[in-house]
Image: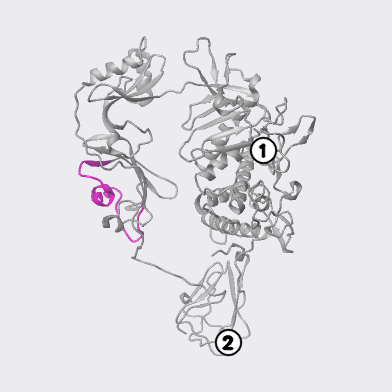
Amino acid sequence: MTNKIYLAGIALLLFITGAYAQKDTLTGNKYLLRIATPFSNANRLTIRPDTTIDPLTFFSTQKKALDLGTDDDMRLYQANSDKTGLIHYRYQQYYKGYKIIYGEFLLHATPGKLIRGNGKMIRGLNKRPSINISKQKALQNALQLFPAAKYAWEIPQLENNYKDIHHDTSATYYPTGEIVWISKDDDSGQQDPASYELAYLFDIYTASLDGKRFFISVANGKLIKSFPLVYNCTGTAVTTNFNGFQGFSTREIPGSGPASFNLWNDCQAAFIHTRNWNTDLAKATDFTSALNNNWNALASAATSHWAIERTYDFYLSIFERKGWNNADGGINIYQNALFPCTIPPSPPPCPYPNNASFGNGTMLVGNAGTASTIDDFNALDIIAHEFTHGVTETSANLVYSKEPGALNESFSDILGVSCYAWFNGLNANKWLLGFDRKNPNNTSQSLYIRNMANPGDRGDPDTYLSDPKWISTTTVNPGNDSWGVHTNSGVQNFMYYLLVSGGTGTNDNGTPYSLIGIGISAAREIAYRALTNYLTATSTFADAREAWVLSAEDLYGLCSLQAIETGKAWDAVGLPPPSLGITAHICGDYGITLYSVVRPDIYSLSPDNCNMRIFPSSLVEFGSDKVILNPGFHALPGSHFRAYVSDCRYAAHY
């Protein structure tokens, strides 16, 4: 026998080494192709696994591959290791000896071996430094732009405090005036080399510790750009619509005379600005409070502002994600927003306030059209649901139609209720999305939108395709919900409920199921990884099943309890694992008498009324859904054996 025999079916394994057909997406030069995978680009490099490069010499030995010139220099300024053993190196780019603001690149490596890199390098600078203005003159110009009766370096106590903070007796608030390259057009560090100018960088603090950074041209002494270093946030609290007395951050309005505040949080990298819709977006205004930062009269606006702060904290603390776009993108919230009438089944007269939405950093929140606040659309799980649309938008970017659209809605539900449980505790009523909203005329009645533990409760399906409530995605007419993106979300929602909590039953295909559940902490990690690492714009429910199982294996191991339960949860909602051939008979010639069970935790190989002999054991391979007999395996005529696959079959994938 010269070919592999696959007991669980036929598979084609394709190995490609040393050949890359795609054109390099970074520079198209042969030097890069020698070290990086073909999918590397200007901001992300993945080093070929068959290439060993020392991260400490990477930039000096690979300038041609990186398209860096002789005047470009990458200088290491920070290194740290994490619990996985990876070492992370942070490099700063210099050109002709001067730092390039926003020119930073990170390398990730095991000891002595570079794995990948990411960041931004500014290429193609071709400028000659021309310093016509002295540092002292440039500082005078900056101080004129930021006048103060006294500055921090003129106050001895502040200077002493600064030295103590930095454990440095030479530390001072006095501006150093470092000369740097700065893009005059783009604070994010755009790569147009023509936009860069040489400037003095001054960090200036007043005696009240208000701070601002200035870039003053070394050529003519004019301001290139500036931005604040202190964000003037003030802590306050309000009785929120649904979560009691909670604290949040606002901003004291500069120069407002008697203290006046607005609903701005500029105290974190991702700003949050909450405004009043005022009949339409063009007329939106800031909410303000001149009463000692008291927001009780504007509780709904303050609730939305607070809920976004908590959602940001959830993503940062649980997933280490920096905001909705993972780049600390800001959010503008518009309270009292009105929406077009496109939501089923029978929308009220247009426009109407019964909704919430999120897109490209802008959130609209409706006040439900009543004088009461207890039915507003700013419950924490709803706000987190909308925020998650931004996460999806900047990761999988699931098309908002048919199956991808239903997955889009479902991931927002899943991570929305996960945020709610994170804040309110695991015993909170997390499966009723919008549970906190109440009917003003009957406050014992919850106005929840979807029931993830029982989707049929709100007319949503719990089984893929077979449930009568499933909205067909093959019809010509999409209806008014893009082929049921809100309705069909019930399938993945119910899968998540079973994965977290467990359950028994029989689905609409007649398939029985029984799960013990893995808890919300593990399940939300799998959900986030599937969404952000595996799915694409047109992913279907079958793709989602694959993504969840792969994510569970990544996080918890092949055939782990978490991976098996994930597969079982998808089987319960009508998406079973790939077809497996459990029993097979092989005739051939055994050579040496030895029996070896290679993966007893997954499979058992047992004689079936015959003498079974396998040697060497390396000739037999075990995968999650197959047993492979490699060339060299022999069996006597008439002999056979059977491979039994355990519950790990639920975690099988392609």
In magenta segment, residue 66? yes
Q: Position of residue 396 (x, y in %)?
A: 52, 49
Q: Position of residue 169 (x, y in %)?
A: 31, 22
Please say if 598 is above or below 373.
below
Q: Position of residue 232 (x, y in %)?
A: 47, 21
In magenta segment, residue 71? yes
Badge 1: residue crowd in 10 Å (few <14, some 14–19, many ≥20): some
Q: Which mark is residue 573?
A: none
Q: Which residue is mark 1?
A: 341
Distance from disc 2 to disc 1, alpha carbons, whole Å, reads: 70 Å
Tell me which residue sits at (54%, 52%) in the image: 530
Q: Amino acid at mark 2?
A: Ser
Which numbered disc flags the more N-terminal residue, 2 or 1?
Answer: 1
Left or right: where 615 falls relative to 80: right
Q: Quadrant of residue 121?
A: top left
Inspect this view and state whether residue 585 appears. yes
Q: Which residue is mark 2?
A: 639
Q: Secondary structure at mark 2?
A: loop
Tell me which residue sits at (52%, 86%) in the image: 635
Q: Position of residue 571 (x, y in %)?
A: 66, 61
Magenta region: which residues?
Answer: 46-74
Quarter of the image where the C terminus is located: bottom right
Q: Quadrant of residue 366?
A: top right
Q: Amino acid at mark 1?
A: Cys
Looking at the picture, tell me which residue is in the foreground, 182 or 117: 182
Q: Secondary structure at mark 1?
A: loop
